[in-house]
Image (cartoon, helix red, strand yellow):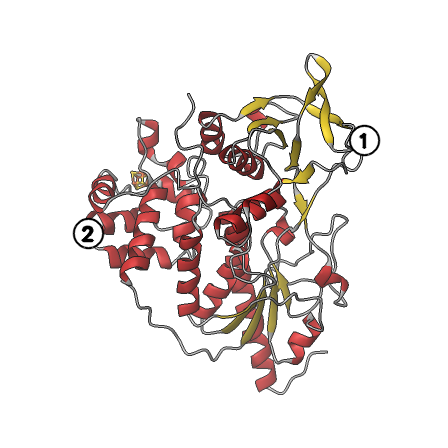
Amino acid sequence: MIAKDNKSFQVVREGFTIKEAIDEAKRCLNCKVPQCKKGCPIENDIPDFVHALSMGDMGKAMSIINGKSNLPAICGRVCPHEKQCEGHCVLAKKGKGIEIGRLEQFVADFDADMGLIRERLPHKTRGRVAVIGSGPAGLTVAGDLARMGFNVTIYDCQEEPGGVLMFGIPEYRLPKAVVRKEIKKIEALGVGFVQNCMVGRNNVTIDSLFAEGYDAIFIGTGTSIPQNMDGVPGAKLPGVNQSTYLLHCVNSFNEGAIDRDMIPLRKGERVGVIGGGNVAMDAARTAIRLGADVTVLYRKTREDMPAMASEYDDAVSEGVKFLWETAAVEFIPGEDGRLKSVRLNTPDGERVEDFARIYLAIGSKPANRIVSTTEGIDVDEKGYVIVTDRPVGMTTRRGVFAGGDVVHRPQTVVLAMKAAKEVAVGIAQYVDAIKLLEDCRIRIE
Ligand code: SF4
């Protein structure tokens, strides 16, 4: 079955209407020991917000969600709910679990549109914190610290904040308008944003930020360097590109920033996507929307794929094909020097198939721009930042913290948020402690 909507970048899963949301919320049993909450990495108070929603009290539902999450409209759309809250819901075992993700999305969207909540915020007197990077980890740390009474400024290298949320996840899964509204809410908490600022270049460094008077600095720069296949012959041929490059180009095209011919894909081309994670699914589903004939090449089996089941199901229904246990062992050029075909190692032996383009989605690693321009921040052999348990998330340089993918390797949005929430507590404890020592006129070297 091929889905009708594989040609457009309109959202695939529409949200609930108000009646649908309340009807769905009324199905919740308000369990005494809610399994759904156990399945949520940030322990959202699910039964409580669902109950408030079932009573039509949107403001209360939003306040309950705000207690745990700064990005509910995003989590409601991109979290792997089937493995988390919804997968754990007792009703899932009896047939149809509560659609918690869509309920969270509904409440967050309703609040963004209606301006329901005006939070009472503490004065920002506890200290100054710089956050580097505005993806899920950076936004979470910034929002949590602002709510705790810290003065927070986010430094980000792009024109617009959002990081992977804005430039990595396709429009049909996470509309940019939703990300912008969520960021507006974080701005409303008093968080400042400095855009087009690449920390580690142009005289802005960790040291220069400390010199500006910040008490602590958080690095949440994610993993921006995609892995390549340099060991495979022909991996540098024109026509072999990164999936993240395709996704970035298409997001820019959808925003009207570039023309269609600047996207490295022509209609009707046969393309292969190498990988089995969510980035591979995003690239494959994006390529099919651009009119390509798309095949995902994955070296393991369907069961081993790290992509969300719903992403895989949608990709199949939109017409994406899959070759399992298949590895590219050579990229072969045509007479024009561009990629023409790929030698594949399959369970049935080697064969050569024509592909006009290949997009790689085999993982990514952190850039070393910040650690290479800062004394004293240790990284492991793969470049991931090493952090301590006490205070949570502090690097080997005092006062510099890190969290999210730059520490824990690439993972989902909500897991980056979970790690960042813990680090926000560590930063608060650290800044409180140094302020106390300063008040006692004790200086730590
Ligand atoms: Fe409601 Fe399901 Fe959670 Fe029980 S487990 S409280 S039914 S969402």
The residue labelled by disc 2 is 56
Residue 313 visible, this angle: yes
Relative placement, left or right, of 193 versus 274 is: left
Counting from the top left corner in percent of width and height, residue 173 is at: 44, 42
**Badge 2 amino acid:** Gly
Question: Of 129 and 388, which appears nearest the observer?
Answer: 129
Nearer-N-terminus badge (2/1): 2
Mark 1 Cα shell of 10 Å, populated few (<14), some (14-19), many (≥20) = few
Q: How many marks?
A: 2
Residue 416 visible, this angle: no
The residue labelled by disc 1 is 233
Q: Does 370 appear above or below 150?
A: above
Residue 431: image tag: none
**Badge 1 amino acid:** Pro
Element carrying mark 1: loop
Ligand 1 near label 1 (Cβ, under 8 Å)?
no
Disc 2 from disc 1: Cα separation: 61 Å
Ligand 1 near label 2 (Cβ, under 8 Å)?
no
Q: Which quarter of the rendered picture does the N terminus lie within?
A: top left
Where is ligand 1, by quadrant?
Answer: top left
Which residue is found at the position 64% from the left and 53% from the top? 406
Task: Please tell me in which quadrant of the rendered image residue 116 appears.
Answer: bottom left
Question: Of 132 and 322, which appears nearest the observer?
Answer: 322
Element carrying mark 2: loop
